[in-house]
């Protein structure tokens, strides 16, 4: 296909009535309000704890907060929609009231959760399933003109790491994006971020192949989001638990930012902001 029909250089994103500028990497802070997330599960289940963590990440320099009520770690099971709503909607409502200037993203695969989250104050939909679980979530994004984070995943979280196989992981991820972005454009969704889905149906080699081929993903012409924070591509490589993976995560963030990633999704906001400051200074050659 003629890629100029669907793709174009895009250094901004419209979200929450404002423009997000991608000339420098945007920091998305992770706020999991689920009991079984792989790193911070159970820490922010209470509303007061979630709000305090949101305020902390804002103070540390987060540009966006991504709020999720269902773990998508390998082996995770789906959560009933009613339970997911009970977890995320009060948190989004409270954060939006306390810091209305903060952009909020809802991390969900369910259309009704996405819709109610947007009504409660979220502006962005982060759907790891790319509409595979509930195609109606794409209609929610289109109807609300909400930016949509399109992620690649082979399989589903409960079995995605059971021997994932690719002939050429980068080529297959790119082809997936081309096909799905065409669908999103046809539905009227114009603000799209692409997430190659590190750790989602991919082996260690697949993850590092995508990292090596980052420039090929950039050729699609849409903003890229990388979620590598404390994931298995750090932990398995270094033989450490997620609690000890900050240093490795920082190394990956440094490499991705130097390669020009538009957004990183992180557990540790302060450290990611520090990396961004250093990378900016290195690229400019002078501190201003």
Image (cartoon, rainbow, N blue to C red):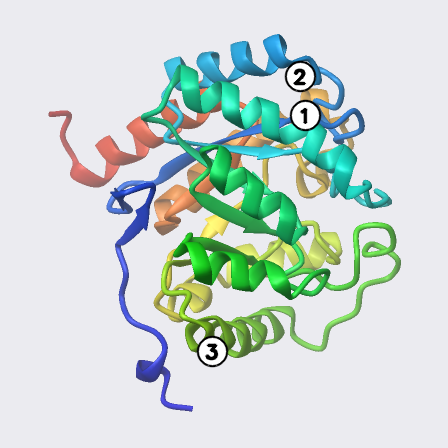
Q: Is residue 46 something that shows in the picture?
A: yes
Say which residue appears at 24% left-offset and 46% top-offset.
Answer: 23
Q: What residue appears at the point 47 percent right and 55 percent down from the top-left corner? A: 148
Point out which mark residue 33 bears: 1
Does label 2 or label 1 sit earlier along the sequence?
1
Residues at circles 2 and 1 in contact by the CB criterion of under 8 Å: yes
Looking at the rendered structure, the number of numbered marks drawn on it comes to: 3
Q: Residue at x 65, y 69 (%)?
A: 169
Q: Residue at label 3?
A: 182
Mark 2 and mark 3: Cα distance apart in space: 37 Å
Quarter of the image for residue 229 reads top right
From this view, report whether residue 86 is shown above or below residue 202. Answer: above
**Disc 3: CA contacts within 10 A as few (<14), some (14-19) or many (>=20):** some
Callout 1: few (<14), some (14-19), or many (20+) C-alpha neighbours within 10 Å?
many
Dot 2 crowding, Cα within 10 Å, few <14, some 14–19, many 20+:
many
Judged left or right of residue 204, residue 12 is left
Q: Which residue is mark 2?
A: 44
Task: Label 1: state its secondary structure.
Answer: loop
Q: Could you say which is closer to the camera, residue 176 or residue 238? A: 176
Tell me, yes or no, if residue 194 can be seen here.
no
Left or right: 228 with respect to 205?
left
Marks 2/1: CA–CA distance: 5 Å
The tag on residue 276 is none
**Numbered disc 2: secondary structure:** loop
What quarter of the picture does the C terminus occupy? top left
- The answer to whether marks 2 and 3 mark residues whose Cβ atoms lie closer than 8 Å is no
């Amino acid at each position: 296909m003629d890629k100029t029909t669907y793709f174009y250089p895009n250094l901004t994103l419209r979200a929450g009535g404002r423009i997000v500028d991608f000339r420098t990497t945007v920091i998305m802070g992770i706020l999991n309000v689920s009991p079984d997330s792989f790193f911070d599960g159970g820490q922010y289940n209470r509303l007061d704890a979630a709000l305090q963590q949101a305020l902390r990440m804002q103070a540390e320099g987060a540009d966006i907060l991504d709020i999720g009520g269902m773990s998508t770690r390998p082996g995770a099971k789906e959560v009933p929609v009613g339970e997911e709503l009970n977890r995320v909607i009060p948190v989004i409502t409270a954060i939006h009231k306390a810091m209305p200037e903060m952009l909020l993203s809802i991390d969900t695969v369910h259309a009704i959760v996405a819709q109610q989250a947007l009504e409660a104050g979220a502006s962005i939909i982060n759907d790891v399933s790319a509409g595979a679980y509930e195609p109606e979530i794409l209609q929610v994004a289109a109807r609300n003109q909400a930016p949509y984070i399109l992620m690649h995943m082979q399989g589903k979280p409960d079995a995605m790491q059971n021997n994932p196989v690719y002939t050429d992981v980068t080529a297959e991820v790119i082809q997936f994006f081309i096909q799905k972005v065409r669908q999103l454009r046809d539905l009227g969704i114009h603000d799209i971020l692409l997430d190659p889905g590190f750790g989602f149906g991919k082996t260690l080699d697949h993850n590092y192949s995508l990292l090596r081929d980052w420039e090929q993903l950039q050729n699609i012409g849409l903003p890229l989001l990388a979620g590598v924070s404390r994931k298995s591509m750090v932990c398995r490589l270094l033989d450490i638990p997620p609690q000890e993976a900050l240093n490795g995560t920082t190394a990956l963030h440094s490499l991705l930012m130097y390669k020009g990633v538009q957004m990183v999704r992180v557990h540790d906001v302060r450290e990611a902001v520090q990396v961004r400051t250093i990378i900016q200074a290195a690229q400019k050659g002078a501190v201003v």
